Amino acid sequence: MQLTWNKHTADIDYINGNEVLTNIIASLFTDARAHDDDTLPDGSTDKRGWWGDSFSDKKIGSRLWLLSREKQLPSVLKRAQEYAEESLQWMIKERLIKSVTVVAANPSNGVLMLTVRPVLLNSKDVPEYSFTATLNNI
């Protein structure tokens, strides 16, 4: 079983799984808890995230959801890249990959595209995965 990316959402496929891809999708598109100094997009006090993060050093998800009401600016793309890379660091610590780079772009109005390139542990391969999401659905 694995997660696959289908245009703007993830689907479950019952095939020989790609653990790296599944972990990337889960890391990017699960809401991480906002930091105390983060500005929440809807003006609420809901920091979202998984409640279990309060009791563990291993944090789950990304803060990409904080960008849901942002304008398409270079500074927002930089934050998207930082949030995505931050959410994938656990894979390096757990020795699932050697390193990872993320490139964030706006291919069209209201759309964020993340290109993720993980360096695999036992291979010189660097697969490339691209994900697009509408900004209000991150």
Image (cartoon, grey):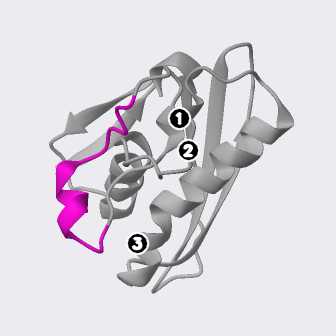
On the question of residue 128 being in view, the answer is no
**Residue at 40%, 40% in the rendered image:** 29
Q: Position of residue 83 (x, y in %)?
A: 57, 52
Q: Quadrant of residue 3?
A: top left
User: Which residue is denoted by mark 2 in the rendering?
Assistant: 38
Mark 2 or mark 3: which is in front? 2
Q: Position of residue 6 (x, y in %)?
A: 40, 27
Residue beneath disc 1: 66
| Secondary structure of the residue carrying numbered label 2 | loop
Crowding around mark 2 (Cα neighbors within 10 Å: few <14, some 14 to 19, many 20+) is few
Marked residue nearer the N-terminal end (1 or 3) = 1
| Front in this rendered view, residue 69 or 126 | 69
How far apart are the two marked residues, 1 and 3, measured between alpha carbons?
A: 20 Å
Q: Which residues are magenta?
A: 45-58
> Residue at coordinates 36% horizontally, 41% vertically from top-left?
31
Estimate the spatial distance between the alpha carbons at disc 2 and disc 1, rounded to whole Å: 8 Å
Magenta residues, dominant SS class: loop
Q: Position of residue 40 (x, y in %)?
A: 51, 32
Mark 3 residue crowding within 10 angstroms, few (<14) / some (14–19) / many (20+): some
* Circle 3: element type: helix
Residue 51 falls inside the magenta stretch: yes
- The residue type indicated by label 2 comes to Asp
The residue beneath circle 3 is 90
| Label whose residue precedes the other's in the sequence (2 or 3) | 2
Confirm or deny contact between disc 2 and disc 1 (CB under 8 A): yes
Residue at 55 percent of width and 44 percent of height: 38
Q: Earlier in the sequence, mark 2 or mark 1?
A: 2
